[in-house]
Amino acid sequence: MTRTVVESKTKTAILGFDEPFCVIGERINPTGRKKLAAELEAGDFSTVEKDAIAQVAAGADILDINAGVVYNSNPNPNETEPPLMRKIIELVQGLTDTPLCVDSSVPEALEAGLIAAEGRPLLNSVTGEEDRLEFVLPLVKKYNVPVVAISNDDTGISEDPDVRFEVAKKIVERAADFGIPAHDIVVDPLVMPIGAMGTAGLQVFALVRRLREELGVNTTCGASNISFGLPNRHGINNAFLPMAMAAGMTSAIMNPVALPVGPKKLQEKRDELAAAGIIVPEDLDPEILATITGLGSTKSKAGKEMEAIRAANFLTNNDAHGASWIKFNKPPSADGEAGGRGGRRRRRG
């Protein structure tokens, strides 16, 4: 069976057809997060620290590290991103021994990340574009790391799944020319938004099956792409992930954390209840208010997507005796540690 090994200095995460689904935490990424981008430019890494700890606690097996900030003071990412990538990786490695994924579109930042990362990180990413193949594949070979292969090329992203398969096949074949085995290629077949393309789900399920059966590669995706622009995105994601797993997908780049309910949401709920004639005591614990009103939690916890993934692992016999499912659903212990907190993933013999 195909197995892709990703390692930190002391921990191992394995992507494989007979392995539990691998969750790659996506939160350490300033893209679309203005507050985080501003903090990074100012040298403030407090959100990075919180995101790293919260994602590991929620069950992330690998942490994606993206330093793609466009500084106001220097808009050239070729100059700013490599040192920032090194800094973030060193910081995160000081907080957790969870394996890492080095994620950048800047070639120099990729190599800077590979130099800084301990163990055997996952590299994100290579595409079928010629210049990208010519730079990234030698890096993959030089540092002996696995790589995410995204199914687009110089012509862009095709809506035809057969074209996307051929791009993936091309990358696998070109990698073989460098002596890179198929088990070190993790293909992202590209998930289209279901709101824009009604066949997007069916396409990716069929593609994943072909990639597994014909190329023998592991797969990943940006899981939330499927629900982009739609209401109740978690509901769609929760259905998509187990279906993708059943088709053979072995990992996803996603947010494992249910973001906590903040004071603003709590006050809005208080005002809504007051308008309905229901007075909430001022001294009511915020966590109790969030729970009984269905808002969620004031604490960072594993999201519903993680619940769906763990259930699917159990149902596909990738959770021996349901041990992870039972642990995930245990109530918090006396020291406050939630049952869903992930430790080292077990290797299977």
Image (cartoon, rainbow, N blue to C red):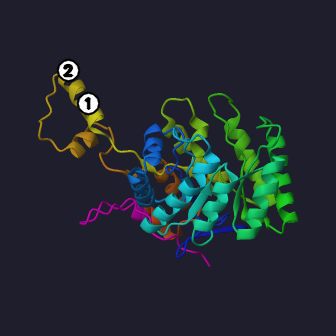
Q: Which residue is drawn at 60% across and 39% down?
A: 225
In the drawing, what numbered circle is on residue 275? 2
Q: Does the magenta stretch include residue 203?
A: no
The x and y percentages for residue 211 are 77, 54
Would residue 182 be found to the left or right of residue 82 on screen? right
Q: Is residue 342 magenta?
A: yes
Identify the residue at the far bottom of this view.
349
Quadrant in the rendering for residue 328: bottom left
Residue type (three-letter) at the residue carrying disc 2:
Ala
Would residue 232 be found to the left or right of residue 78 on screen? left
Q: Residue at x 50, y 29 (%)?
A: 231
**Mark 1 — residue?**
269
The x and y percentages for residue 248 are 68, 55
What is the quadrant of the N terminus in the image?
bottom right
Quadrant in the rendering for residue 348: bottom right
In the drawing, what numbered circle is on residue 215? none
| Above or below, 116 relative to 30 | below
Segment colored magenta = 326-349
Q: Which of marks 1 and 2 is nearer the N terminus?
A: 1
Distance in Å between CA atoms under marks 1 and 2 = 10 Å
Of residues 51 and 190, the one nearer the viewer is 51
Magenta-colored segment: predominant secondary structure = loop
Q: Crowding near pointer 2: few (<14 within 10 Å), some, many (20+)? A: few
Would residue 146 be found to the left or right of residue 265 on screen? right
Per the image, label 1 sits on a secondary structure element best described as helix
